Image (tube, rainbow, N blue to C red):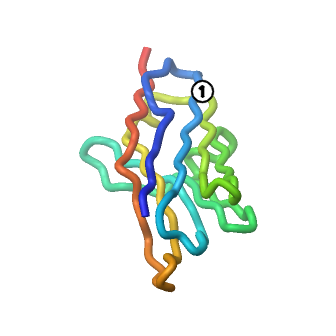
Amino acid sequence: VQLVESGGGLVQPGGSLRLSCPASGMIRSINAMGWYRQAPGKQRELVATITYKGNTNYADSVTGRFTISRDNTKNTVYLRMNSLKPEDTAVYYCNAQVTTLDGVLRAYWGQGTQVTVSS
């Protein structure tokens, strides 16, 4: 199973970005999907998660600014980020709880995409 993030980059404060992360491979089903981030010198932290049915959960620091969504037909999770702040600068990783064709459930991670918010 592979997860590949895209959509990161350099943006000015107050700007917007949309991250995408399709999952591919020997997938039977995907349960929860989510986005995490890690800033330099800090631990990886949860940004947002979404269940298969669309129930969402957000970190307090991004509530009202970020929106997580998914397309189950494409095995893809998205993160729309508005009103970006310099403190949102980090490497963003997607995560998926995948049941593979052999019936094994485990978590998979993407390689990360850099988001830099700076003027």
Q: Tell which of 6 and 42 is nearer to you.
A: 6
Q: Quadrant of residue 54?
A: bottom right
Name the residue: 61% across, 28% down: 83
* Residue 2: % across, % down: 42, 58
Packing grade of label 1 (10 A; few <14, some 14-19, many >=20) is some
Q: Tell which of 35 and 101 is nearer to you.
A: 101
Q: Residue furthest left?
A: 41
Q: Tell which of 84 and 92 is nearer to you.
A: 92
Q: Is residue 92 above or below residue 24?
A: above
* Residue 45: % across, % down: 42, 56
Q: Is residue 55 above or below residue 15?
A: below
| Mark 1: amino acid | Ser
Q: Residue furthest bottom?
A: 103
Name the residue: 40% across, 28% down: 116
Tell me the quadrant of the picture where the C terminus can be found: top left
Kindly state the secondary structure of the residue where label 1 is placed: loop
Residue bearing mark 1: 16
Name the residue: 60% across, 52% down: 77
Q: Tell which of 5 and 89 is nearer to you.
A: 5
Name the residue: 52% across, 57% down: 23
Tell me the quadrant of the picture where the N terminus can be found: bottom left
Left or right of 7, for residue 65 = right
* Residue 110: % across, % down: 40, 53
Q: Is residue 26 above or below residue 64?
A: below
